[in-house]
């Protein structure tokens, strides 16, 4: 079952992003927030796509938010974790700080959303 997280930053960036996939679609769908430099935005990407790319601009050079490159301070609390067997890794978001694609500071934070979907 998938869920939703909220992402926000001091610069005003504020979005909701879906995580994971549906029960039926979990073998080919795994949504996760990614950093798109081209859009300067956090975008929702299906990491199980053959060529994962930004849904807004088609940029393929995107970075998933579990990448060390984007993690500032690792938080103690897990906001969302998704075991992506197809990717061979666990996708994890904590309440720590992340790099914001809009203002380039480490002020981006994730928090729990209220929507669950399947
Ligand atoms: Zn983009
Ligand atoms: Zn920002």
Image (tube, rainbow, N blue to C red):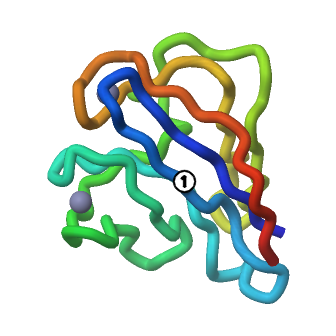
Ligand 1 resides in the quarter of the picture at: bottom left
Q: Residue furthest left?
A: 38
Tell me: 92 left or right of 68. right
* Viewer-proximal residue among 69 and 11: 11
Residue 24 lies, with reference to residue 110, above or below; the image says below
**Residue 68, percent from left and from top:** 48, 26
Q: Secondary structure at mark 1?
A: strand
Determine whether, in the image, residue 12 is placed left or right of residue 27: left
Left or right? Give the position of 104 relative to 31: left
Where residue 73 sits in the image (x, y, percent)?
A: 54, 11
Q: Residue at x 31, y 52 (%)?
A: 62
**Residue at (76, 53) in percent of width and height:** 114
Q: Quick one: quadrant of the C terminus?
A: bottom right
- Name the residue carrying label 1: 16
Asked whether mark 1 lies closer than 8 Å to ligand 2, one says no
| Residue sitting at x 54%, y 53% | 16
Quarter residue 110 falls in? top right
- Crowd around label 1: few <14 · some 14–19 · many ≥20 (10 Å): many
Whole-percent x, y for residue 70 in the image: 41, 28
Q: Residue furthest top?
A: 73
The residue at the point 68 percent across, 28 percent down is 94
The quadrant the N terminus occupies is bottom right
Please state which of residues 53 and 85 is positioned toward the viewer in this rendering: 53
Q: Residue furthest front?
A: 12
């Amino acid at each position: 079952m998938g869920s939703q997280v909220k992402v926000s930053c001091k610069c005003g960036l504020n979005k909701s992003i879906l995580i994971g996939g549906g029960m039926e679609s979990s073998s080919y769908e795994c949504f996760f927030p990614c950093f798109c430099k081209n859009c300067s935005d956090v975008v929702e990407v299906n990491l199980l796509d053959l060529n994962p790319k930004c849904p807004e601009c088609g940029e393929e050079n995107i970075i998933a938010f579990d990448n060390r490159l984007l993690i500032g301070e690792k938080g103690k609390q897990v906001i969302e974790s998704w075991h992506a067997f197809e990717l061979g890794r666990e996708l994890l978001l904590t309440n720590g700080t992340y790099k914001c694609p809009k203002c380039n500071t480490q002020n981006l934070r994730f928090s729990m959303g209220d929507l669950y979907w399947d």
